[in-house]
Image: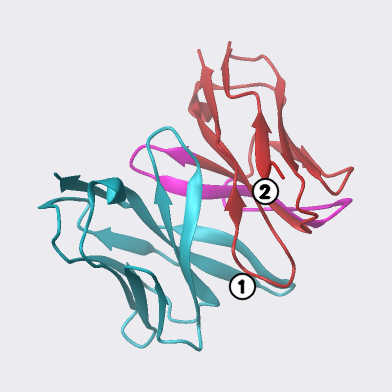
Chain colours: A red, B cyan
Amino acid sequence: NAGVTQTPKFRVLKTGQSMTLLCAQDMNHEYMYWYRQDPGMGLRLIHYSVGEGTTAKGEVPDGYNVSRLKKQNFLLGLESAAPSQTSVYFCASRRTTTDTQYFGPGTRLTVL
Amino acid sequence: KQEVTQIPAALSVPEGENLVLNCSFTDSAIYNLQWFRQDPGKGLTSLLLIQSSQREQTSGRLNASLDKSSGRSTLYIAASQPGDSATYLCALVLYSGGGADGLTFGKGTHLIIQP
């Protein structure tokens, strides 16, 4: 049972490049979330999903897209990266029947 | 918009001391409140979750309380140990029309326990 895993762990992009961050969970959780963590700002919710095939916007969704084609995976895409998207990205998941969220180890993204 | 404030931002205490971390929030209509710890370069680990109908939760040396009327929560750590050194985050569950959703986080308290 690996819990919540994130790929990649580190990435450096140039402005305008695109990439996809992968979050995978093996706990059969229905809910999945993407957050970003910035110094002095705390963690903020980007997008979330309440089940396979569904997604919703969080507090800071602009510049990101997400997909949940399979229950165990939640993808976060950056179509045209900007320096303001330099951050640490965390994925989390939880069951419908409990409120405790389980977090992945994070992806550190730098956009030059 | 719900805002979560954690005081102090940083705290350094000698090993063995009991300590209290504070969290305040602006909107008392919360679904629940959670305390996490984050170690450097790592993800978040859930410590305690308090439902809105509860007043406190305990796990080992940790005790978290919730006072919705005053918009405050505290995390009490008894007999602190160097291994408790980490950043502690307070987070509230937002509640949308479809059910409880994402978390609203405070900026955290960076705790150092001196051996």
Q: Is residue B107 visible?
A: no
Q: Nearer the viewer, residue B83 or B87?
A: B83
The answer for which chain carries disc 1 is B
The span shown in magenta is A37-60
Point out the residue furthest to the left here: B14
Give me the residue at 38% from left, 55% from top: B89
What label sits on residue A85 in the rendered view?
Answer: none
> How far apart in space, not on screen, are marks 1 and 2 (Cα)?
15 Å
The answer for which chain carries disc 2 is A
Query: Residue A24's spot in the image, x, y percent?
Result: 74, 39
Q: Nearer the viewer, residue B47 or A70?
A: B47
Mark 1 residue type: Tyr
Query: Residue A103's spot in the image, x, y percent?
Result: 58, 47
Q: Is residue B32 visible?
A: yes
Q: Secondary structure at mark 2?
A: strand
Residue A50, relative to residue B50: is it above or below?
A: above
What label sits on residue A47 in the rendered view?
Answer: 2
Q: Which residue is the site of mark 1?
A: B95
Q: Is residue A54 magenta?
A: yes
Q: Is residue A57 magenta?
A: yes
Query: Residue B69's spot in the image, x, y percent?
Result: 36, 88
Q: Neighbour class for label 2 at 10 Å: few (<14), some, many (≥20)? A: many
Q: Which quadrant: the N terminus of chain A? A: top right
